[in-house]
Amino acid sequence: MSHAIGIDLQPFDEVEESLRLFGERYTRRLYTNAELRDVSGDPHLAARQLATLFAAKEAVMKVLTPSSEIPSWLDIEVRQVKDCSPSISLSGVAARLAHRQGITDIAVRLGVDRQCATATAFANKDTEGSGSR
Amino acid sequence: MTTVDETIRSVLKAHGRLAVDPETLGETVDLYTSGLSSHSSVNVMLALENEFDLEFPDEMLTKATFQSISSVREALEKMGVHDGA
């Protein structure tokens, strides 16, 4: 058994700028429809929520440590973010990478302050039972 | 006429949030070690799509594509973007 940790920090103002400059093209490339359904219609609050989602996705991405095969941002879905312990659903390349490394569950903790969102992701790797054998 | 290389550097300057001036970067210098974050690389991609009126296919949305100015240029060339085209 080994472990993997991923940490990320995402400033709110960067997401706010992305929304202002690229709008729906930005959200469509990074967030699933289910994730977007939970996001506020208020642009300021939406930027905070999307920054939190992105930090979680990037932290999970670091846990998965992709090399040749890179997951899409849409392969990592983050839901139920209100309690700071969101549920993570993997699909596509992300799910394959997790399977190969014997990762069955990824725990994520979120934090926010006035300027940015933080996310820490943790996973156990069951190397004995992984799909890489 | 603006070259592809100049446009890439201009987009990096506007959206890459690099720790160094993109104008001074060698074309094979690692952009991530120069301060490019994953989130900023998405903005760079979207801005390049605006500049060249194209859409990066999903298989090109990898860290390797935005590793350096030359790797970005190679990705654009695969999509038919060339100097003078």
Image (tube, rainbow, N blue to C red):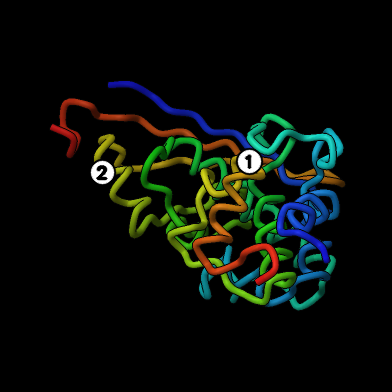
Subunit of label 1: B
Q: Is A109 in front, or is A28?
A: A28
- The image position of residue A61, as x and y in percent, is 49, 43
Classify residue B81 as left or right of residue A87: right
Label placed on residue A58: none
For the N terminus of chain A, the image quarter is top left
Tell me the residue at 67%/69% (across/down). Answer: B49
Label placed on residue A99: 2
Quadrant in the rendering for residue A14: bottom right
Tell me the residue at 24%/39% (across/down). Answer: A100
Pointer 2 local density, CA inside 10 Å: few below 14, some 14–19, many at least 20: some
Classify residue B12 as left or right of residue A102: right
Subunit of label 2: A
Determine which residue is flagged by label 1: B68
- The image position of residue A123, as x and y in percent, is 40, 34
- The image position of residue A31, as x and y in percent, is 57, 66
Instruction: Answer above or below: position of A5 versus B46.
Output: above
**Label 2 element class:** helix
